[in-house]
Image (cartoon, rainbow, N blue to C red):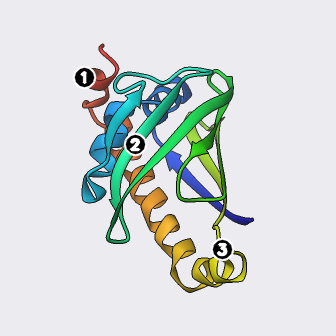
């Protein structure tokens, strides 16, 4: 399996960053380039333990559906989602949160395995890994922007 680890420092409280990371509405905003829409399960608000969401989006020129379920959660320190259905053979995304000097360190550990054996492995190396890094980094920058500004109040109903 491929593994991507990204760390993002955010000038906001851990609880805010944790909740924004679970926000279906913020995910839609952060993925406007792929026109992601929540079409099944939890389609707005904050996703919780044992809930799922099905996303419909255009990635790499193809429309795809991906269903993920929140399989573990300890507020506000971590949550994990795993793919139930989608283009990957396997996919797991661990979201970790830690307070450091009144800031929040958000760490993503994203693991995925492409189908088709050797061809899938080659696809990962040639472009899919870098595509996923860019996609996740863009999402994290949007979480950071919203958490450090005032927009979080609308998304989290404050």
Judge the density around disc 3: few (<14), some (14-19), many (≥20) Cα neighbours within 10 Å: few
Residue drawn at the location 51% of the way across and 65% of the way down: 132
Judge the density around disc 2: few (<14), some (14-19), many (≥20) Cα neighbours within 10 Å: many
Where residue 123 appears, x then y in whole percent? Answer: 58, 81
Name of the residue lying farthest toward the top: 158
Name of the residue lying farthest toward the right: 1
Marks 1 and 3, the one that precedes in the sequence: 3
The image quadrant that residue 94 belongs to is top right
Marks 1 and 2, the one that precedes in the sequence: 2
| Residue assigned mark 3 | 116
Q: CA distance from mark 1 to mark 2?
A: 22 Å
Q: Is residue 3 above or below residue 94?
A: below
Where residue 46 appears, x then y in whole percent? Answer: 44, 22
Taking 75 as reference, is 32 left or right? left
Residue drawn at the location 68% of the way across and 30% of the way down: 71
Mark 3 lies on a secondary structure that is loop
Residue drawn at the location 53% of the way across and 51% of the way down: 86
Disc on res. 154: 1
Taking 62 as reference, is 4 left or right? right
Which label lies toward us, 2 or 3?
3
Disc on res. 55: 2
Which label lies toward us, 1 or 2?
2
Disc on res. 123: none
Where residue 49 appears, x then y in whole percent? Answer: 61, 21
């Amino acid at each position: 399996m491929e593994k991507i680890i990204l760390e993002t420092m955010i000038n906001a409280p851990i609880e805010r960053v944790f909740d924004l990371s679970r926000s279906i509405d913020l995910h839609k905003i952060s993925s406007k380039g792929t026109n992601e829409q929540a079409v099944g399960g939890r389609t707005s608000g904050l996703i919780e333990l044992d809930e799922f969401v099905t996303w419909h989006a255009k990635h790499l020129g193809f429309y795809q559906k991906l269903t993920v379920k929140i399989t573990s959660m300890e507020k506000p320190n971590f949550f994990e989602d795993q793919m139930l259905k989608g283009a990957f053979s396997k996919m797991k995304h661990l979201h970790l949160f830690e307070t450091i000097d009144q800031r929040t360190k958000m760490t993503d550990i994203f693991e995925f395995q492409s189908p088709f054996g050797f061809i899938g492995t080659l696809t990962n190396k040639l472009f899919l890994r870098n595509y996923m890094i860019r996609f996740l980094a863009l999402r994290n920058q949007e979480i950071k922007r919203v958490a450090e500004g005032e927009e979080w109040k609308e998304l989290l109903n404050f």
